[in-house]
Image (cartoon, grey):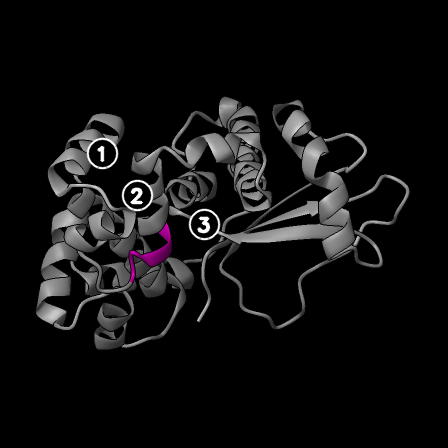
Amino acid sequence: MCTPTLLAYFQPNSRPQVLAWQDGGHYASVAVSFDVDRPPRAVESGFRSIAERLQQVTQEEDCFWVARPLNLEMQTIARKLFAPDIHDSLIQSYISLKAQELLCLAVDKALIDQGSGLPRRRAADKVGMAKAYIDEHGLEQISVKEVCAHLSISESHLSKKFRERFGTTIYEYIVDVRMAKAYDLLSFSDLHLKQIAYEVGYNHVSNFCTAFKKKYGMTPNSVRTQQDLAASSPISH
């Protein structure tokens, strides 16, 4: 099963361009590449601080790269990249800005993983830690109570601060993470509905279908029907 992933390729200017995709492969990924010697300004300072470590860990023959699962925020941006709802004259600038936004989030995650100053400051931020915990474990059968217990914080306090910060409840965010994953599985896999429900933390298909329709205003089967119609439609040039 494919997990939506951001693949950021860092291509040194002195090396020939390489094709990372294998013929016949199946991917659920968003790829963004740039010259390692001239990183985008939006991520330059953060990238410089991790470039040496990335090169040591992921050096390849022609380029080095980092791949990270997309959290809910990144998946939302990726969908806008695939289907930009904007005037044609602005699409190029729009896609460039969204790609930089994805890169910022990827570099941010890399900085956190290597323990830079910003992550240490975040260590005391239990609201942010709660969101990160849900991003990582939201597909499991976790509850609000479990999230609070993991962080050793009262449910009432975390719930209040979480809503103030993110404009949604902890439970609603857990559901959002699950529904985003379900939408991708419906779009990019042939798994049966029962298996998809289980993969995103639901033991009963009926509960999953109710939650999905509440989130997207359509049934899971409707998503599959739309995808089939799109795949069978002729592509205009």
Q: Which residue is mark 1?
A: 162
Picture coordinates of residue 57, whole percent (x, y) = 73, 55
What is the span of residues highlighted in magenta in the rendered image?
135-139
Q: Amino acid at mark 2?
A: Ala
* 136 is within the stretch colored magenta: yes
Say above or below: 57 vs 106: below
Which residue bears the numbered disc 2?
Answer: 130
User: Could you tell me how far apart the alpha carbons at marks 3 and 2 are, in whole angstroms?
Assistant: 17 Å
Question: Which residue is found at the position 69% from the left and 51% from the top?
Answer: 65
Q: Position of residue 223 (x, y in %)?
A: 26, 59
Residue at the image point whose x is 28% and y is 46% from the top: 151
User: Of tags 1 and 3, which is closer to the observer?
Assistant: 1
Do the residues under discs 2 and 1 have CB atoms within 8 angstroms? yes
Q: Which mark is residue 70?
A: 3
Residue at disc 2, secondary structure: helix
Query: Going by the image, does 128 lie left or right of 234?
Result: left
Q: Residue furthest right?
A: 14
Q: What residue sits 24% from the left and 72% below the top?
A: 198
- Residue lying at 12% horizontally and 72% vertically, measured from the top left: 204
On the image, the x and y values in percent for residue 85 come to 38, 32
Judge by depth and name the residue closer to the eye, 70 or 143: 143
Q: How far apart are the alpha carbons under marks 1 and 3?
A: 21 Å
